[in-house]
Image (cartoon, rainbow, N blue to C red):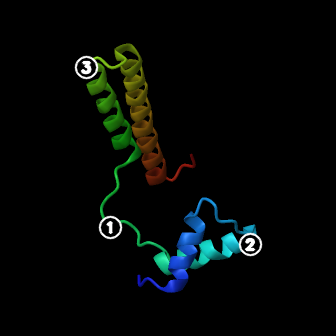
Amino acid sequence: MKRTPDTMSDAIALSSPSGKMSKAARKRANERLRQALFGDGLPMPTCQQETDRERLLRQAAELRALAGRGMCPHRYIREAQRLETEAKVTDCDLKITDCDLRFGSKP
């Protein structure tokens, strides 16, 4: 992106705490900045994203580690157990859905 006087003045006007702009002018300035900064949009991530099950298990492990260091041990262990249970349910739901799709039954 190349900085132009238009984008710089819009950015300054939008970030100025005492600057007053009408709603319509702010909306147009935001749209000009969005188009100048991002164009048609950001590219989709190319790395593999973690699944819901992996995310839940990672959060549970983080909570258990915090509880192990003495931070809200009862609360964090209870929340970690809830997340692990949710991960098991999510895993079971995926298996059932896959099985249903393979055998042609409707969920």
Question: Which residue carries the number 1 mark?
Answer: 46
Q: Which mark is residue 32?
A: none
The count of marks equals 3
Q: Quadrant of the N terminus?
A: bottom left
Q: Position of residue 48 (x, y in %)?
A: 31, 59
Q: Which mark is residue 24?
A: 2
In front of the other: 23 or 104: 23
- Give the class, few, some or many, for how many residues have Cα within 10 Å of label 1's Cα (few <14, many ≥20): few
Question: Which residue carries the number 3 mark?
Answer: 68
Label whose residue precedes the other's in the sequence (3 or 1):
1
**What kind of residue is marked 1?**
Thr
- Give the class, few, some or many, for how many residues have Cα within 10 Å of label 3's Cα (few <14, many ≥20): few
Taking the spot 41% from the left edge, 69% from the top edge, the residue there is 44
How far apart, in angstroms, are the residues tagged by discs 3 and 1?
35 Å
How far apart, in angstroms, are the residues tagged by discs 3 and 2?
53 Å
Label whose residue precedes the other's in the sequence (3 or 2):
2
How far apart, in angstroms, are the residues tagged by discs 2 and 1?
36 Å
Q: Position of residue 71 (x, y in %)?
A: 33, 20
Taking the spot 64% from the left edge, 65% from the top edge, the residue there is 19
Q: Position of residue 20 (x, y in %)?
A: 69, 65
For mark 1, give the secondary structure. loop
Name which quarter of the figure residue 91 lies in.
Answer: top left
**What kind of residue is marked 3?**
Gly
Closer mark to the observer between disc 3 and disc 2:
2
Q: Are marks 2 and 1 in contact (CB under 8 Å)?
A: no
Closer mark to the observer between disc 2 and disc 1:
2
Closer mark to the observer between disc 3 and disc 1:
3
For mark 3, give the secondary structure. helix
Q: Are marks 3 and 2 in contact (CB under 8 Å)?
A: no
In front of the other: 73 or 37: 37
For mark 2, give the secondary structure. helix
